[in-house]
């Protein structure tokens, strides 16, 4: 029901989480693993909801590594300044803000890239939606060059707790031991919105962190 129940008193053990529905993230095959100049799909993944109810999500973070001579021009630092990268569902571009932790139009080799959709993405009960993270690639695409990406779960030292049953801004604010990369909801609250306390973090989301997906250069 989207509520968070914790064992109190002298009992020991793990916290218990109850949700109307939960998301499952799984990777899908890239349309091509060849690193070439032009628009390329860096990451392809599916978000599914179980039969019990709809789920939605409002933030996702990708970890992207590349060789220094591969350039993603237009992916600068600063909130919303990574305009080179876009998230698609089929042929539809998802409106939102893409933010990189470093300037990826330079020789930088690793960044986290955060996407926040303008409107929460909703996956109906028993259905799934497949997404592609696309970028305009320039620079060196010869043998030995690559772009590697994955969807990451937040890791911080001895983090052992999940953010559950909270408003969206509470989760995105985070702190040194509670911070989330994939933020989702079971939409169980009456008049569900960003302000209702039916949002949760990524700590127990199945398949996070994902395996990597790689684009590799060829030739000389």
Image (cartoon, helix red, strand yellow):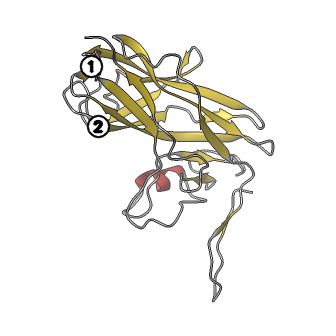
20 sits left or right of 87 in the view: right
Badge 2 vs badge 1, beta-carbon distance below 8 Å: no
In the drawing, what numbered circle is on residue 53? none
135 sits left or right of 74 in the view: right
- Which residue is located at x 50 percent, y 31 percent? 118
For marks 2 and 1 on the same chain, the one whose residue lies earlier in the sequence: 1
Q: Kindly identify which residue carries mark 1.
A: 73
Q: How far apart are marks 2 and 1 (CA)?
A: 15 Å
Q: Is residue 105 above or below residue 162?
A: above
In the rendered image, residue 145, in percent from the top left (x then y), is placed at 29, 23
Residue toward you, 83 or 157: 157
Dot 1 alpha-carbon crowd within 10 angstroms: few under 14, some 14 to 19, many 20 or more: some
- Under tag 1, what secondary structure? loop
40 sits left or right of 194 in the view: left
Q: Which residue sits furthest right? A: 51
In the rendered image, residue 36, in percent from the top left (x then y), is placed at 36, 12
- Under tag 2, what secondary structure? strand
- Which residue is located at x 53 percent, y 60 percent? 163
- Residue 173, quarter of picture: bottom left
Q: Kindly identify which residue carries mark 2.
A: 110
- Which residue is located at x 35 percent, y 31 percent? 80
Dot 2 alpha-carbon crowd within 10 angstroms: few under 14, some 14 to 19, many 20 or more: many
In the rendered image, residue 128, in percent from the top left (x then y), is placed at 69, 31
- Which residue is located at x 65 percent, y 44 percent? 23
Q: Nearer the viewer, mark 2 or mark 1?
A: 2
């Amino acid at each position: 029901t989207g509520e968070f129940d914790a064992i109190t008193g002298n009992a020991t053990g793990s916290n218990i989480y109850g949700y109307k529905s939960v998301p499952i993230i799984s990777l899908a095959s890239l349309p091509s693993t060849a690193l070439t100049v032009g628009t390329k799909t860096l990451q392809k993944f599916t978000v599914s909801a179980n039969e019990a109810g709809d789920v939605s999500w409002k933030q996702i973070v990708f970890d992207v590594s590349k060789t220094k001579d591969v350039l993603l021009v237009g992916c600068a630092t600063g909130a919303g300044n990574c305009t080179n990268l876009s998230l698609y569902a089929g042929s539809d571009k998802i409106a939102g803000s893409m933010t990189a932790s470093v300037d990826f139009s330079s020789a930088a080799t690793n960044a986290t890239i955060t996407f926040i959709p303008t409107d929460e993405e909703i996956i109906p009960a028993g259905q799934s939606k497949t997404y592609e993270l696309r970028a305009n690639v320039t620079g060196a695409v010869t043998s030995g060059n690559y772009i590697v990406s994955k969807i990451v779960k937040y890791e911080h030292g001895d983090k052992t707790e999940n953010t559950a049953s909270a408003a969206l801004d509470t989760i995105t604010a985070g702190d040194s031991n509670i911070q989330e990369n994939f933020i989702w909801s079971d939409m169980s609250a009456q008049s569900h919105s960003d302000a209702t306390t039916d949002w949760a973090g990524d700590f127990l989301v199945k398949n996070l962190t994902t395996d990597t997906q790689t684009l590799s250069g060829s030739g000389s």
